[in-house]
Image (cartoon, rainbow, N blue to C red):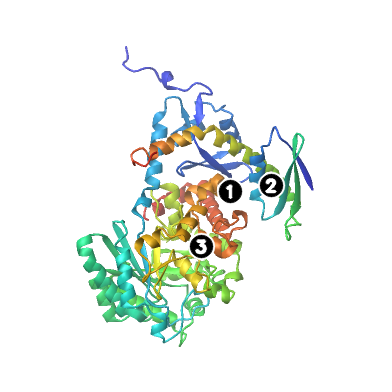
């Protein structure tokens, strides 16, 4: 089956990460198609019965991955600051 | 006139908070668990997660206080949050600088048992082929005391180490002699079935504070089925050996481990009851490992991770019920996980470390003089896979062993914070890299996590522990007790 995702809503990174989490159940090929990502989805052998469930779970995972990306980007500076504090007295900084 | 500003001065204004780094994982359709940078966690609803990210949390709400107090969000001026997270991060990784603690000496592969799932043992009288020599042991001790770790644990494994007890004695006496000038916190443990213990052996162990770690798989029929030996009397000999050992060394000088064979899967309660009958205060539900005879005899393939998790859940729930009735009894794998989840301590369990504990937390000196990065690595060698051989006692220096490209490559390539799926996983702070397992099962040290039974097992256990804590405050209290005893 094919699933079209709006590029403005779903980043490539989030789509790839969501697809990776499903590689034991479905194979997902991602290609750009204008303003959308075109996802071609096929079940892995032995997972045909629950294919529709996997698709529904994949859609939920897309949203989670987009939220994870938001947290990661928004906290990048503070993450570096925490690591700076962590190693501040080790003499290991460049 | 008051000296203090009114409370309102300290309250945040709507939308003024910032996110601190955190990860989340769905628990069900409504709730997620969120973990902060060092693995402290909270349960929140999906709705609250989305409100948090859109900066619309009410500063007067309980969820706001919870997230602020556990370092998921900060207000402008909350600089202490970042300093505290930095300090906790440093504490979390502080064990790494101590380097190797566990040094395993495989003093012989010979054994009086022929367990189906055993990874390595040989029923052989050929001492020359399967015993470590004094020369090898002394070279290994020279490497042991190069470790910078103030605590050194020497564990004797086999086969059955008591079949080469003269070498065990030599290593203990030599290590203690070296330690007179080194002053390390030196510990000795023999892993033994206890079927061959004698008073002479026990008196030596008592004189030199050598502990014993043994194996008990469950009630007599199950234990004997799992652990065949001539005479089919493994259980009877175990009971005799346990009583004799406790009589000389003391009740707490012996601990026991079980291995889940296919025949164990319907016997979780029986197995726990057997441990209680012998006065043990805990059990470690161990799954089979995909190495050696477990693969050859098809024991490993006899059940999958979902079946093991069902067994684990049944056993864990039974143990929780016992605790609620006042019986102090611990499931030790849960206790290791809970120590990571509920305290700032890391128990240093090799399978649950990142970077992987292979080589840097444990190292194995094999009976033939080769050096391996972990116990599982030397088991792979018995399947003719020497990938994780990191040196040889006759040809390698300390520097050669611990800067070996095989070791460094495996540590770097399996690092969870940069691994696909792991890097985004809320359970990552509690989990570990297991390059040897993934090499054995997937052909590369990283593996594909969605297909990894290691990943499924850890995720399954963590979700079970979280679910039990979330639904029952009494369980949380029991788990806190387990976490603080490691």
Query: Which numbered mark, 2 or 3, is in the foreground of this view?
Result: 3
Which residue appears at 60% of the width and 65% of the height? B304
Residue tagged 2: A57
Residue B283 visible in the current orientation: yes
In the image, residue B61 sits, relative to residue B391, either above or below, namely above
In terms of depth relative to the viewer, which is nearer, B350 or B320? B350
x then y, percent, for residue B143: 32, 64
Residue tagged 3: B436
Q: Which mark is residue A62?
A: none
Q: Residue furthest front?
A: B395
Disc 1 sits on a residue from what chain?
B
Residue tagged 1: B421
Give the image quarter of residue A5.
top right
- SS state under label 1: loop
x then y, percent, for residue B173: 24, 72
Residue B66 visible in the current orientation: no
Disc 2 sits on a residue from what chain?
A
Q: Using the numbered discs, state the Cα–Cα distance from disc 2 to disc 3 in whole angstroms.
A: 31 Å
Which residue appears at 59% of the width and 46% of the height? B27
Mark 1 neighbour class, 10 Å CA radius: few under 14, some 14 to 19, many 20 or more? some
Q: Mark 1 vs mark 3: same chain? A: yes
């Amino acid at each position: 089956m094919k699933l079209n995702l709006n590029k403005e809503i779903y980043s490539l990174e989030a789509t790839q990460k969501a697809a990776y989490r499903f590689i034991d159940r479905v194979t997902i090929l991602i290609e750009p198609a204008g303003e959308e990502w075109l996802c071609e989805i096929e079940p892995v052998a032995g997972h045909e019965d629950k294919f529709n469930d996997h698709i529904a779970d994949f859609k939920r995972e897309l949203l989670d991955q987009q939220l994870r990306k938001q947290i990661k980007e928004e906290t990048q500076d503070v993450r570096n600051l925490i690591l700076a504090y962590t190693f501040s007295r080790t003499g290991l900084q460049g | 006139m008051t000296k203090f500003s009114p409370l309102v001065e300290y309250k945040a204004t709507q939308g003024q908070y910032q996110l601190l780094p955190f990860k989340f994982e769905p628990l069900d359709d409504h709730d997620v668990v969120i973990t902060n940078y060092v693995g402290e966690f909270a349960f929140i609803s999906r709705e609250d997660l989305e409100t948090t990210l859109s900066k619309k949390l009410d500063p007067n709400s309980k969820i706001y206080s919870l997230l602020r107090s556990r370092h998921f969000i900060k207000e402008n001026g909350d600089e202490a949050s970042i300093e505290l997270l930095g300090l906790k991060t440093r504490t979390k990784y502080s064990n790494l600088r101590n380097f190797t603690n566990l040094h395993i000496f495989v003093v012989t592969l010979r054994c009086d048992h022929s367990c189906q799932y055993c990874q390595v043992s040989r029923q052989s009288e050929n001492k020359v082929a399967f015993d470590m020599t004094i020369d090898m042991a002394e070279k290994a001790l020279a490497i042991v005391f190069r470790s910078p770790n103030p605590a050194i644990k020497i564990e004797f494994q086999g086969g059955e180490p008591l079949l080469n007890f003269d070498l065990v004695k030599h290593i203990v006496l030599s290590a203690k002699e070296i330690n007179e000038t080194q002053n390390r916190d030196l510990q000795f443990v023999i892993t033994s079935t206890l079927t061959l213990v004698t008073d002479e052996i026990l008196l030596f162990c008592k004189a030199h504070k050598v502990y014993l770690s043994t194996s008990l798989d469950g009630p007599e029929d199950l234990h004997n089925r799992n652990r065949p030996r001539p005479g089919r009397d493994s259980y009877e000999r175990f009971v005799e050996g346990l009583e004799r050992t406790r009589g000389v060394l003391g009740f707490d000088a012996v601990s026991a481990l079980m291995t889940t064979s296919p025949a164990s899967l319907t016997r979780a309660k029986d197995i726990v009851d057997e441990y209680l009958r012998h006065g043990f205060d805990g059990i470690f539900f161990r799954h089979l490992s995909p190495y050696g005879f477990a693969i050859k005899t098809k024991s490993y393939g006899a059940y999958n991770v979902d079946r093991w998790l069902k067994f684990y859940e049944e056993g864990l729930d039974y143990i929780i019920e016992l605790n609620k009735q006042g019986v102090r009894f611990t499931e030790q794998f849960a206790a290791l996980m809970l120590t990571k989840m509920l305290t700032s301590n890391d128990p240093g369990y090799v399978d649950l470390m990142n970077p992987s504990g292979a080589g840097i937390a444990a190292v194995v000196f094999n009976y033939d003089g080769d050096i391996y990065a972990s116990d599982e690595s030397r088991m792979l060698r018995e399947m003719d896979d020497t990938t994780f051989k990191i040196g040889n006692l006759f040809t390698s220096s300390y520097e050669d062993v611990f800067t070996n490209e095989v070791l460094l490559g495996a540590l770097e390539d399996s690092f969870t914070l940069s691994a696909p799926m792991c890097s985004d996983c809320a359970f990552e702070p509690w989990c570990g890299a297991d390059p040897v397992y993934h090499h054995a099962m997937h052909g590369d040290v990283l593996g594909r996590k969605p297909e990894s039974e290691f990943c499924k097992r850890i995720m399954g256990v963590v979700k079970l522990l979280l679910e039990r804590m979330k639904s029952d405050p009494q369980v949380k209290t029991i788990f806190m007790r387990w976490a603080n005893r490691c």
